[in-house]
Amino acid sequence: MAKLRSDQLEKSLANVKSPMAPVYLVTGDEPLLVQEACDTVRHAAKQRDFLERELHHTDAGFSWDSLTHSANSISLFAEKKIIEIRVHNGKPGDAGSKALVEYCKAPSEDNLLLLEFPKLDKRTQNSKWFKAVEACGAVVTIWPISLQQMPHWVSGRLKRAGLSADPQAIEILCAKTEGNLLAASQEIEKLKLLSDDHHIDANTMANAVTTSARYDVFGLADKALSGNSRSAVTHLQGLRGEGTEPTIVLWALAREIRVLTLLKESMDNGKSFDFIARNAGVWDNRKPIVKQALQRLSSGQLHLLVRKVSLADKVIKGISTGDIWNVLLDIVLSLSGTQALSAQSQRMMLRI
């Protein structure tokens, strides 16, 4: 039906009287923007009486039969529902491809299917299942914000929050967050509490960002990438002691792991490090530690880290049991190049 940019999505759903597409696929590697796009779809669906929601993660215990079952099951309260499926690795496989093609042939008016994918490559976009989704519903592509676009994005975000800022203040925030949209967004929320006249000058911005403990999560990631496991563990314990939300810690680690995995796969395909690092938004001053981590970690270790990130996400959401800080500790040690658990213990943990 349509290909939409994230900035077009809200406008396309503004008229509550107009029907929504039966399927929405949100794809991209910018977590904050992907989350907000999905929130926009959910909010619009709720306004149209889609009051029930089922959430599925395509982990080892997931079966694509769940989609067929959910689509065919009738609510006890006869409510329309959202069926949300998060495909963490971007590959539905043969079973998922078949299920999506079949679903798109005759989607029910009482269901809205929301699919969340990481960035999809050209080959995937030419697949049969993607073409079926594209023909049936709407594909929302989330493009990353480049370093050059960051000041404009921050300025727009400030305006949405009812704030304005000096160009130098915006430059300070961009430099401190280094392209991290989630951190920038969180700082802007804090600035709303600090500003009396809704205008942020350079001094206010500098004081706000330098006293923010949450930026330590970037220091944690850097220490892990550098292979300094002892310092990284101490840093993680400090974050926990300061009351930092585990969601923020996981976000910072997951971001690095996704970038490392992308770089590793591209380098294995013969692309140069400098070229792919630039395209992935790796700042020049961080290239040495990123390159060091790539030399230390194998593709298999990175894929295992991706699975551990998925587990941590489910523990935070209450889908899986466990102590989130223990899971984060294992991720930090693994990213640093230290195996805290035996191979058998790791397999058992990932099955939980």
Image: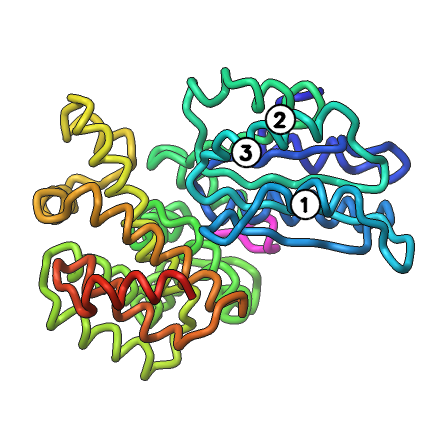
Report if residue 285 is visible in the image: no
Query: For mark 2, what is the residue?
Result: 4
* Residue depicted at x 45% and y 51%: 60
Query: For mark 3, what is the residue?
Result: 95
Asked if residue 267 is positioned above or below residue 290 in the image, the reply reads above
Magenta residue span: 158-165
Query: For mark 1, what is the residue?
Result: 40
Residue 283 in picture, x, y percent from top left: 21, 41
Comes first in the chain, label 3 or label 2 = 2
**Residue sticking out furthest to the bottom:** 241
Inter-mark Cα distance, 3 to 1: 29 Å
Label 1: which secondary element: helix
159 drawn magenta: yes
* Residue depicted at x 27% and y 62%: 331
The numbered mark at residue 51 is none
**Residue sticking out furthest to the top:** 126
Residue 219 in picture, x, y percent from top left: 22, 63
Comes first in the chain, label 1 or label 2 = 2
69 drawn magenta: no
Mark 3 or 2, closer to the camera: 3
